[in-house]
Image (cartoon, helix red, strand yellow):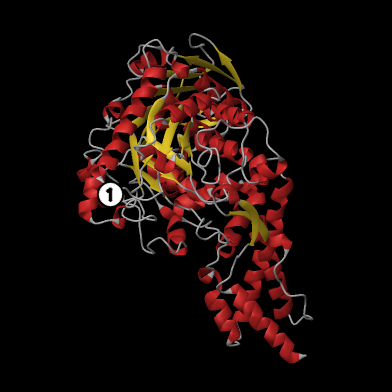
């Protein structure tokens, strides 16, 4: 009898441990405490929102519920006996604020010197019906809380474990800068990225596509109303396309920062109309829905004269003042106000100059309004964010710098993809220090935005982990974050297949195949069979992933389009290797083919032209091993 009781006790403990397991949420929350009890969601949830919750957040709440088959009703108060979702602002005495007080939920999170602070609580009433509370420091913080709720519903459906989550972001601005040299993202990819960003709590997207002539060469001219098919292929945008893009950005609470690149004109004393011209362009962009602006003067030469340095800083200060006087006066509607400028200076990698010149350059910004974001890429162009570089620049500039992170950018490696975990990508990106690591306590910046690959959809894998890190530095786990990124990006149906294929979509495929191929060449009795098994596994995974092309999910179709040249070439390479290893007749060797081509842009200014490159997956190991197999097969003939 005692043995039976002991077994029952152990079973009960095990079941309790299962029931009390934390939710898996990314970015990883700062604090999560499982509470006693299970809560049931009904087919209808009553949403009660305080006056500080904006319509965009209400729309997001409705979307999260309806995407999970739950009808969203709205009312001014809680409905007894029904599931309620309370949304409110801390300290306002709205329904959510009062409920938090009544439930005696700790509010220490709002004392943290952090960003987007909020509480997410799931509890039950006496009947076991779910009562969900999201209380934020502002409506944007509540919006972030809804991203966590969305992932909870993904995992639990309508049976929820009770929980209290106290969360915030370590960094204020987290997102993307479309600033690479190459074909700008299509409108479809850009909008898909916005939706992805909302789900994983990224909030800013700076548009500074180097090949967009209306960002750079024609910076003072308004965007055209119509474009040709050829212009669309090289990334041109129309006014209507931009209206649509900014609208979707607002729907996902992504600050779409449109950047202008006036180049040397900005610090040219002889150009006395540059600020007038910039404001005129900003006005045209404001009419298209843009509510935040950037100014780029990168890659035009670093000024060395004190007068030119002072002029640049003075004009930046004056430009921020003009923006405030035009759109941020007391009588302005909230929807028309414009957030502070983002500025990318000529010297963004401070190792280009001596410490003395670096100090003099950044010191020139001492009197620029503190709300203006001034960017660096660190000591070098490809530096990984680190506190030491930030400390140096802060000491010179007297303010914190924002970080433009060239990762997983491939404009210097256009034939390569970087689809692996963060630290594997660091090894593969030849410009990044192999053993660089992300600091668990990054200090000295409010902003981390990534300059991704030309393949925006494949970049999501790196972006997922970067969002995870930017939100919660200390909790970042490289391997777990990558493992979670795969189903988040490609979907559960394709995640396992992509995990098999990803190591060989890379140029540097040593980790996957090197030892197997070397031992196979030495005719080790075991390894040809093991290698064949691996190649068949990859080949099958390639075929499965091709199903994404005709998926009902737009994100998957867009993702397939990005990886298609690399995937098809890898499929053909593994097919040929399998045939040759099995002793089959010689086949047509994998060679350059239109199947493996993707577009790139060449030239500058008015000479930009669309051309093509060949994808290069598995170049370091599988490609030479294929040549070895071909030679071996030819010798037998």
Tell me residue 556's x, y (percent).
Answer: 65, 45
Whether 455 is drawn above or below 615: the answer is: above
Tell me residue 375's x, y (percent).
Answer: 35, 42
Whether 117 is drawn above or below 525: the answer is: above
Residue 231 shown left or right of residue 159 in the figure: right
Q: Residue at 49% across / 8% down in the picture?
A: 76
Q: How many marks?
A: 1
Q: Quadrant of the C terminus?
A: bottom right
Depth check, front residue: 58 or 379: 379
In the picture, residue 603 is in which quadrant? bottom right
Identify the residue at the far right of this view: 585
Residue 396 shown left or right of residue 64 in the figure: left
Tell me residue 38's x, y (percent).
Answer: 48, 30
Q: Is residue 352 visible?
A: yes
Q: Is residue 53 visible?
A: no
Depth check, front residue: 73 or 601: 601
Q: Secondary structure at mark 1?
A: loop
Crowdedness of circle 1 by 10 Å Cα count: few (<14), some, many (20+)? Answer: few
Name the residue carrying label 1. Answer: 304
Depth check, front residue: 156 or 454: 454
Q: Residue at 55% across / 48% down in the picture?
A: 605
Identify the residue at the far front of this view: 270
Q: Residue at 58% across / 70% down in the picture?
A: 619
Residue 304 shown left or right of residue 127 in the figure: left
Whether 277 is drawn above or below 365: the answer is: above
Tell me residue 206's x, y (percent).
Answer: 47, 38
Residue 312 shown left or right of residue 606 in the figure: left
Whether 359 is drawn above or below 54: the answer is: below
């Amino acid at each position: 009898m005692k043995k039976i009781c002991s077994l029952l006790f152990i079973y009960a403990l095990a079941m309790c441990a299962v029931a009390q397991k934390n939710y898996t949420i990314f970015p990883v929350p700062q604090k999560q405490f499982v509470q006693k009890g299970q809560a049931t969601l009904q087919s209808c949830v009553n949403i009660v929102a305080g006056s500080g919750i904006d319509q965009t957040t209400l729309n997001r709440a409705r979307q999260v519920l309806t995407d999970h088959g739950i009808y969203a009703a709205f009312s001014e108060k809680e409905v007894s006996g029904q599931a309620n979702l309370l949304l409110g602002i801390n300290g306002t005495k709205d329904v959510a604020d009062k409920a938090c007080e009544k439930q005696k939920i700790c509010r220490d999170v709002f004392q943290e010197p952090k960003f987007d602070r909020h509480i997410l609580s799931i509890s039950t009433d006496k009947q076991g019906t779910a009562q969900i509370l999201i209380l934020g420091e502002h409506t944007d913080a509540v919006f972030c809380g809804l991203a966590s709720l969305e992932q909870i519903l993904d995992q639990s459906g309508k049976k929820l474990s009770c929980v209290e989550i106290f969360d915030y972001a370590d960094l204020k601005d987290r997102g993307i800068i479309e600033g690479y040299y190459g074909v700008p993202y299509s409108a479809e990819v850009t909008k898909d990225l916005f939706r992805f960003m909302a789900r994983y709590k990224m909030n800013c997207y700076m548009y500074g596509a180097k090949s967009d002539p209306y960002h750079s060469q024609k910076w003072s001219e308004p965007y055209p109303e119509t474009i040709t098919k050829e212009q669309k292929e090289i990334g041109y945008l129309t006014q209507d396309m931009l209206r649509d893009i900014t609208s979707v950005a607002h729907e996902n609470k992504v600050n779409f920062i449109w950047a202008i690149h006036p180049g040397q004109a900005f610090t040219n004393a002889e150009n006395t109309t540059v600020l007038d011209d910039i404001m005129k362009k900003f006005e045209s962009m404001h009419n298209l829905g843009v509510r935040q602006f950037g100014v780029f003067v990168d890659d035009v030469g670093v000024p060395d004269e004190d007068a030119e340095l002072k002029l640049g800083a003075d004009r930046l200060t004056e430009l921020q003042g003009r923006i405030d006087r035009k759109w941020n006066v007391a009588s302005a509607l909230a929807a028309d106000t414009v957030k502070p400028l983002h500025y990318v200076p000529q010297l963004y990698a401070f190792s280009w100059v001596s410490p003395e010149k670096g100090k003099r350059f950044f010191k020139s910004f001492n009197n620029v309004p503190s709300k203006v974001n001034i960017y660096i890429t660190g000591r070098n162009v490809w530096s990984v964010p680190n506190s030491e570089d930030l400390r140096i620049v802060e000491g010179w500039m007297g303010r914190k710098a924002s970080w433009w992170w060239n990762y997983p950018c491939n404009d210097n490696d256009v034939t390569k993809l970087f689809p692996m975990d963060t630290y594997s990508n660091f090894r593969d990106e030849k410009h990044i220090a192999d053993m660089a690591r992300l600091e668990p306590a990054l200090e000295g910046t409010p902003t981390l935005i990534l300059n991704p690959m030309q393949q925006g959809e494949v970049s999501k894998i790196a972006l997922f982990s970067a969002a995870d890190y930017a939100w919660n530095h200390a909790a970042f786990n490289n391997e777990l974050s990558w493992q979670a990124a795969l189903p988040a990006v490609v979907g559960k149906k394709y995640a396992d297949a992509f995990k098999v294929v990803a190591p060989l979509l890379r140029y540097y495929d040593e980790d996957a195949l090197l030892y197997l191929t070397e031992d196979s060449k030495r005719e080790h009795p075991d390894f040809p069979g093991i290698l064949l098994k691996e190649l068949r596994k990859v080949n099958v995974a390639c075929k499965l992933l091709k199903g994404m092309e005709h998926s009902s999910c737009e994100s998957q179709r867009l993702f397939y389009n990005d990886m298609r040249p690399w995937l098809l070439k890898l499929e053909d390479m593994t097919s040929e290797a399998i045939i040759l290893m099995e002793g089959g007749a010689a086949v047509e060797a994998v060679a350059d083919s239109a199947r493996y081509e993707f577009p790139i842009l060449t030239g500058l200014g008015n000479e930009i032209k669309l051309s093509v490159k060949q994808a290069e997956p598995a170049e370091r190991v599988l490609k030479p091993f294929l040549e070895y197999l071909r030679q071996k097969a030819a010798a037998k003939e």
